[in-house]
Image: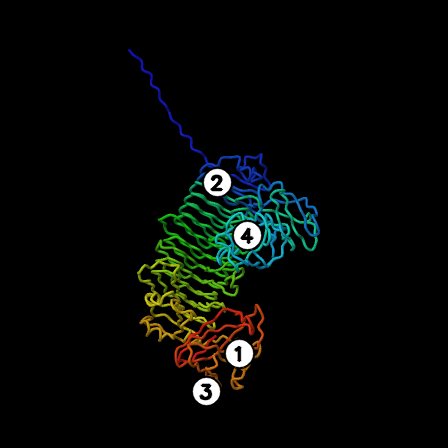
């Protein structure tokens, strides 16, 4: 009889039990951290453990913790416990042991600064990096090589600005931070090239140099010696204050994880980014506040199924929120305030100083919803999106293009991804910024701006007001639908030539159409031109054919004080004056057989202008015959006539020439002031009138831009 032995192997699987870790100011890092009674004292202790799937991190309310949290495991929850305000994760350190350097400047060594701190705070208040000049820009006087800036107007000694940083406006929409290797003979030699070559008339200023410190709170950091210098006026001892420097890169960094929840936290003063998320799926951020990020408040890249709800992001140096290569983003009920408001503290080039920046280099994108957000006070653009399948709905965007311009409340460029909807947003106060440009009085900010080569965008039921250039600006676009929008009081920059509630422009930059029709559909919109010399609709193109084939307009409401404010068009193929041709609505309907069902309504609200003084032009109302008025050549004549209502006017007869110069000399203008010229005119034949102010003696220099007017047999007022 044989005996058999049977071996039974029992496989026992051990499941990992999720843990909850507590962090408290009353804790101790020798504890196990697994209860509120045995909490840890510091965030740094989290670096000593390996988080497992399902773990939770609870931080005591009403407390401040310095450092950062890094998550690379899935299923992690980070939140708060206890009572009081949300706990704070602070990315700054305290700088102490100050000594007097000279006069009002104090110095301390930052041994714990591994690199240059980004922001400095005194008693919790943000302090400005030193700069020269304290306000405004110096001027580039000559275009030279890409790596040089020449300013012949300054009187700096050689080597004064060696190793400083120049902040240059290389275009109206780009600011560049450029390191200077050395300064010699009115030339700054740059170690890096700007986004665009230096241009004559554009501006720059200087920062990151000890010589810039001359105002209270201004600071400079010497990277070689690790010394921080602060100017205090009136003289006070910083040892009696709390001075803090942003040195920690992130508040929370999450990589390669799924099912992450972050809520009920305040994250502030990080050197780079408050929260950074990369290659994560199914993440939730809610009730999180992010303050004073050195770069961007929130960055999310290459992630999917992300919900960002009821968060508050403010005072970011560069962008408030940066979303790149993501899919299925739900961004709702958030506030983004005071983004990129300090020139030179944001990043260089395009795509910076933006509240919400959404980009992708992927060919396919799934649906994104940007809903019910408040965006206020932004250095450049409110929402800049370069992706498809995105709905931007029910947002409020105010006060934008404060530091840079040629932007908008909502903007897109080169976006042919399709299926984009801009719906029921309220956008107002597009300010514009001409500082540091050759034409500082010209301001270019629009409510919604659909830029070069963008197609397939539905813009519906938005309200747009008080923007310096336009309510809606379509530039070299195709297959755009505008419906149900309400645009009023836009085009309020007095120095802009092209402005309106709707502004459509086609030029050589687009090269999009290639013989295709523009296919614009513009219907059931309301255009209110409440500002003097602005228009309901302004059309501009290199060639008239681009305007004649613009698309289908119908059932729109035009409202203005004057009927010829309905539509203006300008095309420059053979027009040196680049004059705007003004139309009443019925004239344009008859000419182009467009705007079917549209109506004009005369505005009942008149904007009253206060009279600042008497008419500066001598005999400007022709009460003394034609005295003071002159014409060239002498064969042409000026004579005074009496019109209806016993009102005098000047009759100008141009004889034997195609042009004439009419002038009135002898009044004083002050640089930097704004002046308004208004006149009533009619002509037996259509003519173009060009106006400017000139020096009254050699070399007869023009003191302002030329303004052009198209005058015909219908008597109209011009401004």
Q: Left or right? Give the position of 687 relative to 667.
A: left
Q: Earlier in the sequence, mark 3 or mark 4?
A: 4
Measure the C-alpha gap from mark 1 to mark 3: 22 Å
Q: Earlier in the sequence, mark 4 or mark 1?
A: 4
Measure the C-alpha gap from mark 4 to mark 1: 49 Å
Residue 71 - label: 2
Q: Residues within 10 Å of mark 3 (few under 14, many from 20)?
A: few
Q: Left or right? Give the position of 273 relative to 365.
A: right
Q: Nearer the viewer, residue 200 or 245?
A: 200
Q: Residues within 10 Å of mark 1 (few under 14, many from 20)?
A: some
| SS type, badge 4 | loop
| SS type, badge 3 | loop
Q: Are marks 1 and 3 in contact (CB under 8 Å)?
A: no
Residue 605: percent from the left, percent from the top?
A: 47, 75
Q: Earlier in the sequence, mark 2 or mark 3?
A: 2
Residue 345 - label: 4
Determine which residue is flagged by label 3: 643
- Residue at x-position 33% and y-position 66%: 545
Determine which residue is flagged by label 1: 664
Q: Earlier in the sequence, mark 1 or mark 2?
A: 2
Q: Residues within 10 Å of mark 4 (few under 14, many from 20)?
A: many
Residue 39: percent from the left, percent from the top?
A: 56, 38
């Amino acid at each position: 009889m044989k005996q058999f032995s049977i071996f039974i192997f029992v496989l026992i699987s051990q499941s990992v039990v999720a843990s909850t870790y507590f962090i408290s100011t009353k804790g101790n890092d020798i504890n196990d951290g697994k209860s509120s009674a045995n909490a840890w004292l510091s965030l740094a202790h989290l670096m000593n453990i390996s988080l497992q799937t399902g773990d939770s991190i609870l931080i005591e309310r009403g407390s401040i913790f310095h450092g950062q949290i890094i998550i690379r495991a899935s299923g992690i929850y980070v939140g708060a416990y206890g009572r009081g305000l949300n706990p704070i994760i602070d990315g700054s350190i305290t700088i102490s042991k100050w000594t007097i350097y000279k006069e009002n400047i104090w110095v301390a060594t930052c041994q714990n600064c591994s690199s240059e701190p980004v922001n400095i705070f005194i008693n919790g208040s943000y302090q400005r990096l030193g700069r020269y000049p304290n306000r405004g820009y110096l001027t580039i006087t000559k275009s030279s090589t890409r790596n040089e800036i020449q300013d012949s107007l300054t009187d700096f000694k050689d080597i004064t600005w060696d190793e400083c940083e120049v902040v240059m406006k290389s275009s109206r929409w780009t600011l560049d931070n450029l390191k200077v290797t050395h300064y010699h003979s009115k030339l700054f030699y740059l170690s890096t090239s700007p986004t665009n070559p230096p241009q004559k008339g554009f501006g720059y200023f200087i920062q990151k140099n000890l010589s810039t410190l001359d105002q209270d709170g201004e600071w400079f950091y010497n990277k070689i010696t690790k010394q921080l210098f602060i100017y205090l006026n009136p003289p006070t001892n910083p040892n009696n204050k709390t001075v803090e420097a942003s040195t920690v890169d992130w508040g929370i960094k999450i990589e390669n994880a799924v099912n992450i929840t972050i809520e009920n936290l305040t994250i502030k003063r990080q050197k780079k980014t408050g929260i950074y998320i990369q290659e994560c799926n199914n993440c939730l951020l809610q009730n999180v506040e992010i303050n004073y990020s050195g770069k961007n408040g929130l960055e999310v890249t290459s992630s999917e199924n992300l919900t960002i709800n009821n968060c508050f992001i403010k005072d970011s140096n560069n962008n408030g929120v940066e979303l790149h290569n993501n899919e299925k983003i739900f961004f709702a009920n958030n506030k983004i305030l005071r983004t990129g408001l300090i020139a030179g503290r944001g990043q260089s080039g395009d795509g910076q100083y933006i509240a919400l920046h959404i980009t992708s280099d992927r060919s396919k994108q799934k649906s994104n919803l940007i809903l019910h957000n408040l965006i206020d006070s932004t250095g450049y653009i409110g929402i800049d999106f370069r992706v498809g399948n995105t709905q931007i709905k029910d947002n409020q965007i105010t006060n934008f293009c404060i530091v840079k311009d040629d932007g908008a409340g909502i903007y897109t460029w080169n976006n042919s991804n399709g299926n984009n909807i801009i719906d029921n947003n309220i956008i107002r106060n597009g300010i514009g910024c001409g500082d540091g440009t050759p034409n500082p009085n010209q301001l270019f900010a629009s409510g919604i701006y659909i830029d070069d080569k963008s197609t397939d965008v539905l813009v519906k039921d938005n309200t747009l007001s008080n923007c310096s250039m336009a309510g809606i600006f379509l530039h070299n676009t195709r297959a755009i639908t505008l419906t149900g929008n309400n645009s009023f009081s836009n085009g309020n920059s007095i120095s802009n030539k092209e402005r309106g509630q709707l502004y459509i422009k086609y030029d050589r930059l687009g090269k999009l159409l290639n013989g295709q029709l523009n296919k614009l559909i513009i219907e059931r919109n309301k255009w209110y031109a409440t500002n003097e010399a602005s228009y309901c609709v302004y059309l501009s193109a290199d060639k008239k054919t681009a305007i004649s084939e613009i698309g289908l307009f119908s059932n729109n409401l035009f409202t203005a004080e004057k009927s010829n404010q309905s539509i203006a068009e300008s095309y420059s193929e053979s027009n040196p004056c680049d004059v705007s041709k003004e139309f009443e609505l019925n004239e344009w309907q008859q000419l182009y057989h467009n705007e079917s069902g549209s109506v004009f309504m005369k505005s009942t609200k008149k904007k009253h202008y206060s009279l600042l003084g008497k008419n500066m032009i001598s005999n400007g109302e022709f009460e003394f015959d034609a005295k003071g008025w002159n014409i060239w050549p002498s064969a042409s004549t000026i004579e005074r006539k009496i019109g209806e209502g016993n009102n005098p006017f000047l009759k100008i007869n141009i004889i034997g020439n195609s042009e004439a110069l009419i002038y009135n000399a002898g009044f004083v203008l002050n640089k930097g002031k704004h002046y308004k010229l208004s006149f009533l005119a009619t002509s037996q034949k259509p003519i173009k009138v060009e106006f400017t102010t000139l020096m009254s003696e050699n070399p007869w220099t023009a003191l302002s831009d030329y303004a052009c007017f198209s005058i015909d047999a219908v008597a109209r007022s011009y401004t």
